[in-house]
Image (cartoon, rainbow, N blue to C red):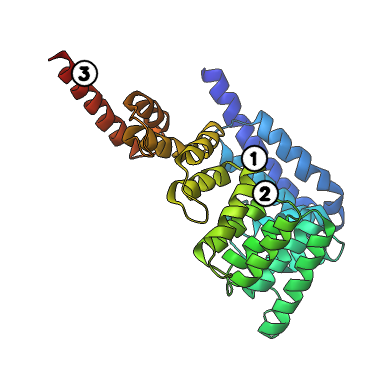
Amino acid sequence: VCVCVCVRRIWCVFVRVCSVVLDKFLSTKHRAQHQWMCKGCTATLNHMANPSDQSTRILVAVNLFRAAADGGDLTGMYHYAVILMAEHPGVDGTVQKNYRQAAKLFAAVAQHGFPAAMYHYGALLLAGEALPDIGTEERLRRAAEIFEACAESGEVPLSSIGVMYRDVPYGGEKDEAQAAAWFARGADAGDQQSHLYLASMYYNGRGVEQSFEKAFEHNRAAADAGNSSAMHNTGVHFFTGKGVELDIDEAEKYFRQAADSGFVHSWINLGGIYATGIGGREPDLAKAAECYEKAADTVPHAKGLLEAVQEKMAEDEEQSRK
């Protein structure tokens, strides 16, 4: 055990020294030649270094990507721009979040037709971090052009573009109408995630006129395509009668599909159906307990529901003995 600990410590010191040496002594014109290190060394660290020493691996990766970016390597520029979107440790201290610098790097890479770089650059245009000196209207126009190019590339999901307008994660004004328009384009193309997002927009009346009927249509389309969240939502539509005729049997079917697909909260809904006997059926506390038990480790209030059902089962058993 002591030998293993010692080897791990030596390895950690070694990779830190390698990172410093590379950063200090590689000239700019030679750094681009070491772009392969950004991928190879990071992958090697992921497999060989102490799995718990995440900070050491990040430190090395940050400095290797920075070296490649300084050398003009497009892959290095892209990855270092991604790093600049959040704080990371570096040899000379923490690499601070810097949207402006990231925007410049994304713009340079986007000129070479890299869809992922174009996507991030469009997001920073929305946020006002890219080209901050031009007017808002012009920035938004350019962002729209960038996103259109992303869509045409076929490598960026239309739902992801809609999310940028809906959530503006890097800042800027939300445009829910634009978001809904992108989700609609994605839904028309058969994208289940776009159906799911558009259903939410219709259900809550965000960016579109509220319509439970259309929300149901899009949730069911996503559910039939295999989306577990949409399966749950479709069950809710049938359970509440919003957008479709109330049907507890259909609600049970979709909740069951969602639960079996890993959507844990659906076990709670199934448990409620079995516990209450809603829809003219007989209550089945044993089935309800099974459902609540499957959710107990994930959903906080499931344990309370399980305990309540178990107490009722115990009371019923005691009554039956009298």
Residue to which mark 2 is pinned: 192
Residue in the foreground of this view, choosing between 67 and 144? 144
Task: Report crowding for label 3: few under 14, some 14 to 19, many 20 or more residues within 10 A (C-alpha).
Answer: few
Local secondary structure at mark 1: loop
Amino acid on which disc 1 is placed: Gly
Q: Give the CA separation, mark 3 to mark 1.
A: 41 Å
Say if residue 86 shows up in the picture. no
Q: Amino acid at mark 2?
A: Gln
Between disc 3 and disc 1, the foreground one is: 3
Q: Nearer the viewer, residue 58 or 275?
A: 275
Are circles 2 and 1 on residues that touch, CB within 8 Å? yes
Amino acid marked by disc 3:
Glu
Q: Is residue 199 above or below residue 171?
A: above
> Which residue sits at x=16%, y=13%?
321
Residue 243 in sight:
yes
Task: Determine whether, in the image, residue 123 is placed left or right of residue 76.
Answer: left
Secondary structure of the residue carrying numbered label 2: helix
Q: Which residue is mark 3?
A: 317
Closer to the chain start, of discs 3 and 1, is 1
* Residue linked to disc 1: 226
Disc 2 crowd, CA 10 A, few/some/many (<14, 14-19, 20+):
many
The Cα–Cα distance between marks 2 and 1, rounded to whole angstroms, is 8 Å
Q: In the image, 147: left or right of 178?
A: right
In the rendered image, the vertical position of residue 40 relative to residue 217, given as above or below: above
Picture coordinates of residue 19, whole percent (x, y): 69, 45
Taking the view exactly as shown, the residue that stands out farthest to the top is 321
Q: Which residue is depicted at the point 67% across and 44% down?
A: 60
- Dividing the picture into quadrants, the one containing residue 265 is top left
Can you give x and y, in whole percent of width and height, for residue 34 in the image?
83, 47
Among numbered discs 2 and 3, the one appearing first in the sequence:
2
